[in-house]
Amino acid sequence: MVGIARSIAIISITLNHAVNRSFSVYHGQHNEFVELPLWVSVTEATVATFSRLGVPLFLMITGALMLHRDYESKGRISRFLKYNWLQLLITTEIWLTIMFWYIQLLPKSVLRTDGIGECLKDFFCTLLFIDPVTMGNMWYMSMILCVYLMIPILAIGLKRIDVRFLLYRWLS
């Protein structure tokens, strides 16, 4: 079942990238709608809607796979942080570095307009996730890093909190 959900999520995210490159998603939507045949507009709307389900689906898969783990035994949380979260953080920092310096090659970059001092300040702020200068697709990494930090807390909470209490509070 997880494999099917993963496949659907991958297809969804792939379609998201295709829709963003094939249609006017952020600007000029009305003009495009007026110019295109109805069946193309309906197809675009359907694919665009489906394409937005990939990220939430991946988050649900992550929760389904990781919330049942034991985080209370000695060393489990530190192992999780070292082998799951830290590896993801390191990979993210490497990509932020590559993307930041690639962007600095562009004509209107901070390096070219404001100099090396401002550029280095922006670089360190980017590495700290403070108003990062990066490409748009990196929003996912900062979000998933925060979600991963919450997984042990949620898993322990779900294990210790009586379900009847949650249902009572939710239903009242």
Image (tube, rainbow, N blue to C red):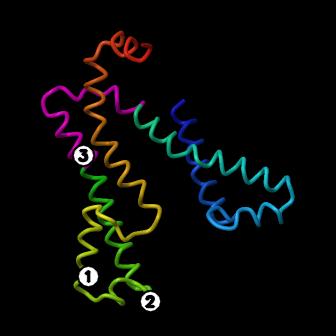
Image quadrant in which the N terminus is located: top right
Mark 3 vs mark 2, foreground winner is: 2
The residue under label 1 is: 118
Is the residue marked by circle 2 packed among few (<14), some (14-19), or many (20+) residues within 10 Å?
few
Magenta extent: 64-85
Q: Going 40% across and 32% down the picture, which residue do you hit?
A: 65
Q: Please state which amino acid type lies under the numbered disc 2.
A: Pro
Mark 3 vs mark 1, foreground winner is: 1
Give the structural element (helix, strand or loop) at label 2: loop
Q: Going 42% across and 57% down the picture, which residue do you hit?
A: 139
The residue under label 3 is: 83
Pinpoint residue 33: horizontal percent, then vertical percent. Answer: 78, 60
Q: Earlier in the sequence, mark 3 or mark 2?
A: 3
* Up-down relation of residue 14 to residue 161 (above or below): below
Q: Quadrant of residue 134 in the image?
A: bottom left
Q: Earlier in the sequence, mark 1 or mark 2?
A: 2
